[in-house]
Image: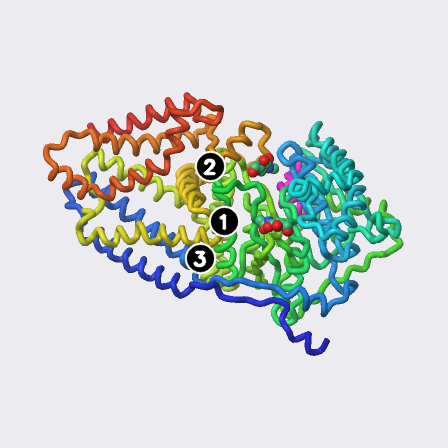
């Protein structure tokens, strides 16, 4: 043992190709310098007012994009990747010596997050390859739904069958839903289990929800109870159902409030030093996840100041080319970049926390693990009674919960803010991306859901940027500058929309007005532009494919990049400003996890974009698409005297034409959805009509 103790439990490697990346970044910066030089040298004469203003706008947008490019480079500058040695962990710790782990699963709305999915997630984490008496699983049900409760009750019975089965056959993944989908014949073999499973599934049919209810805390399986055994006589994990008290007159703080209630209730029941939290739609796809995380926390040399281990989010219901994108690069690469810059952000799910860091303790070397000294003779009902008080509406009044302790309240993206504040208290955090994905969640399956999800994120990030929590402005000493700049990548999502909108609207507008905004494509000044346009695209493609995507997937990602910037982020900005001026109230929108319509599902599986609703977001998308198309058409329909003139025009307006062509190409599905589709996922006629009107008006304004 003595010698073994000095071997690390995890290893950190710098990313490969970092040198190439740094040279690439430097070359782009040089090209950008030439672009600014061009902007200054060719500044329009002061008497041409329109041109001057447009030129200044271009200059500012380019300045903005340069800064944004700079922070994307900062994120990628120090990529690190980590790996663990679980065998050393097993050699060093007997099963009894392993620490306890509490697992929090949160669900909010049984219509959007069906109980069948929730309990699959719960079962998948109950079946971790970890001593069951050390595990406690807590389900927080903010919908307070009977259906979820009874589904969980069923699941607690089913677990007695499921856990031994998983152990015996080394089942992966341990989510029954995912497992049976993967191997249907196994279900037929084991009809008893299939029977149980269908009972649970049936309860999915008739769902209802109550919004006003008292707190329910129910110890469904008490791990201390000697009778809590599975069908093979082994212990079961503790399983707890919690619906915290909700009353309309008290603010319940959405998911952050639920997590804080879970932290308190679990401290009364199991008080494990480590806490895993997952969303109800993210089942465990890798039963070794807890052991992996412990390799970081329990490492003698480098583990003591790690506050949390974040696993990347990956998704189970992606189609091959991911029409709505899936945060691939964000999760596989940028997360590792944050790690290299001092600590990954907390993504709100798939994260193992050290309880004391989450509870608000500062990191210091003397920190001692809190001891759990629960009286073994306590009855379950007395514990439940205490926990009800801990989960009541009034418990947090006049306390630091949500401020200094637990998950932060003041943001729509409570996870990011919480992670930042933990890092600000001098804790470190790491990202771990195992070979077999740790968790699989679901992505929204319609365009509008995706855009709304991003709107919420962008708004939350903007909220942090403009609040007293912005690390760039406050508490700077505790977080390295490179990490603060990395956070800017997301905090600046919303303001980013303006520069993008400028580039989507103004060049086409100026083309109609015959104002040239870029150098001739054949001139020497064209070279840096061409470089800055094409080389970063190639880099982004390489990066995307390296992260496991397809080329079509990358094209789709680029389209979503544009759509999100022109709608989600724009609306996020406007909405947040309205809220600051107190014109509207904050609200938390739970993203739909399951499409209820067969047609929607079919289109998603065939990778056909789903517009299908009247949203102002679609009006903007369609208007922009049409406006750029009109710009091109107007240019093409001009009578040109000679071939030479044509060449000259296309040289002068080369970059504007190129930009319009790219935008038109990216928007091909938009035109199709406006004019050529008949299914229910097309753009509604009213939206098409509005957009046509706006685009025509704008073109007319430009031309006359
Ligand atoms: C999920 O787990 C299964 C079974 O171990 C594995 O085959 C699959 O590759 C995993 N999925 C992902 C996306 O890694
Ligand atoms: C939960 C959910 O929405 N699942 C969907 C994920 O995507 C597959 C197709 O890839 C659908 O069949 C599922 O219904």
Is 251 one of the magenta-colored residues? yes
Q: Give the image location of residue 76, x and y in percent.
A: 44, 59
Label 2 CB, ligand 2: below 8 Å? no
Q: Check the image and report above or below for 14 versus 146.
A: below
Which residue corresponds to mark 3? Answer: 485
In-front residue for pair 139/442: 442
The secondary structure type at the circle numbered 1 is helix
Question: Which numbered tag is attached to residue 575?
Answer: 2
Please give left or right for residue 184 compared with residue 545 in the image: right
In-front residue for pair 91/303: 91
Q: Earlier in the sequence, mark 2 or mark 1?
A: 1
Question: Which numbered tag is attached to residue 288?
Answer: none
The residue drawn where x is 47% and y is 51% is 329
Q: Give the image location of residue 651, x and y in percent.
A: 18, 43
Where is ligand 2, by quadrant?
top right
Which image quadrant: the N terminus? Answer: bottom right
Structural distance between the alpha carbons of marks 2 and 3:
25 Å
Please give left or right for residue 204 compared with residue 580 in the image: right
Q: Are marks 2 and 1 in contact (CB under 8 Å)?
A: no
Structural distance between the alpha carbons of marks 2 and 1:
27 Å
The residue drawn where x is 74% and y is 46% is 390
Q: Quadrant of residue 316?
A: top right
The secondary structure type at the circle numbered 3 is helix
The residue drawn where x is 38% and y is 63% is 20
The residue drawn where x is 20% and y is 34% is 513
Which residue corresponds to mark 1? Answer: 328
- Stretch of the chain drawn in magenta: 249-261
Q: Give the image location of residue 428, x and y in percent.
A: 57, 63
Is 445 one of the magenta-colored residues? no
Structural distance between the alpha carbons of marks 1 and 3:
21 Å
């Amino acid at each position: 043992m003595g010698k073994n103790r000095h071997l690390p439990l995890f290893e950190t490697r710098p990313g490969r190709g970092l040198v190439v990346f740094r040279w690439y970044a430097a070359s782009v910066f040089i090209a950008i310098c030439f672009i600014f030089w061009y902007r200054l040298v060719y500044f329009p004469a002061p008497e041409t007012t329109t041109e001057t203003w447009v030129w200044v706008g271009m200059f500012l947008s380019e300045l903005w994009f340069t800064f944004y490019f700079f922070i994307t480079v900062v994120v990628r500058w120090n990529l690190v990747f980590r790996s663990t040695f679980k065998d050393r962990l097993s050699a060093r710790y007997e099963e009894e010596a392993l620490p306890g782990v509490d697992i929090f699963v949160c669900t909010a709305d049984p219509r959007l997050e069906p109980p069948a999915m929730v309990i699959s997630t719960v079962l998948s984490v109950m079946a971790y390859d970890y001593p069951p008496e050390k595990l406690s699983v807590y389900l927080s049900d903010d919908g307070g739904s009977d259906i979820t409760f009874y589904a969980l009750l069923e699941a607690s019975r089913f677990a007695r069958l499921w856990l031994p089965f998983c152990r015996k056959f080394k089942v992966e993944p341990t989510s029954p839903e995912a497992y049976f989908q993967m191997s249907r014949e196994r279900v037929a073999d084991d009809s008893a289990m299939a029977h149980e499973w269908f009972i649970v599934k049936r309860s999915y049919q008739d769902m209802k929800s109550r919004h006003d209810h008292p707190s329910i805390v129910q110890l469904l399986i008490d791990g201390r109870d000697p009778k809590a055994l599975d069908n093979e006589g082994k212990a079961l994990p503790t399983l707890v159902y919690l619906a915290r008290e909700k009353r309309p007159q008290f603010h319940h703080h959405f998911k952050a409030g639920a997590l804080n209630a879970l932290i308190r209730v679990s401290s009364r029941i199991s008080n494990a030093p480590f806490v895993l939290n997952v969303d109800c739609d993210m089942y465990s796809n890798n039963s070794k996840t807890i052991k992996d995380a412990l390799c970081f926390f329990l490492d003698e040399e480098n583990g003591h100041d790690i506050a949390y281990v974040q696993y990347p989010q990956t998704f189970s219901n992606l189609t091959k080319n991911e029409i709505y994108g899936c945060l691939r690069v964000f999760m596989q690469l940028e997360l590792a970049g944050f790690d290299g810059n001092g600590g990954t952000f907390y993504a709100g799910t798939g994260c193992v926390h050290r309880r004391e860091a989450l509870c608000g303790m500062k990191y210091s070397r003397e920190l001692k693990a809190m001891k759990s000294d629960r009286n073994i003779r306590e009855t379950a009902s007395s514990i439940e009674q205490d926990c009800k008080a801990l989960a009541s509406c009034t418990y947090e009044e006049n306390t630091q919960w949500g401020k200094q302790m637990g998950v932060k309240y003041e943001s729509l993206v409570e996870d990011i803010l919480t992670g930042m504040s933990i890092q600000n208290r001098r804790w470190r955090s790491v990202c771990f991306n195992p070979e077999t994905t740790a968790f699989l969640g679901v992505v929204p399956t319609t365009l509008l859901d995706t855009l709304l999800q991003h709107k919420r994120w962008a708004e939350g990030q903007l909220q942090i940027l403009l609040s007293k929590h912005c690390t760039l402005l406050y508490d700077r000493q505790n977080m390295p500058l490179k990490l603060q700049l990395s956070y800017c990548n997301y905090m600046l999502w919303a303001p980013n929309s303006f520069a993008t909108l400028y580039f989507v609207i103004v060049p086409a507008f100026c083309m109609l007005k015959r104002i040239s905004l870029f150098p001739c494509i054949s001139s020497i000044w064209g070279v840096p532009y061409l470089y800055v346009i094409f080389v970063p695209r190639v880099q982004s493609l390489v990066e995307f494919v390296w992260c496991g995507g397809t080329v079509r997937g990358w094209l789709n990602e680029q389209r979503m990049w544009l759509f999100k910037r022109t709608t989600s982020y724009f609306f996020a900005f406007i909405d947040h400003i309205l809220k600051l001026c107190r014109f509207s109230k904050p609200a938390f929108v739970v993203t739909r996890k399951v499409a209820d319509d067969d047609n929607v599902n079919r289109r998603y599986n065939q990778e056909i974009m789903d517009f299908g609703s009247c949203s102002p977001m679609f009006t903007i998308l369609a208007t922009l698409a049409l406006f750029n198309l009109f710009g091109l058409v107007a240019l093409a329909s001009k009578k040109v005297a000679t071939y030479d003139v044509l060449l000259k025009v296309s040289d002068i307006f080369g970059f504007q034409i190129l930009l319009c062509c790219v935008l038109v190409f990216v928007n091909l599905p938009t035109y199709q959805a406006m004019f050529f589709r008949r299914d229910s996922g097309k753009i509604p006629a009213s939206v098409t009509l509005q957009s046509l009107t706006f685009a025509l008006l704008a073109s007319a304004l430009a031309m006359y």
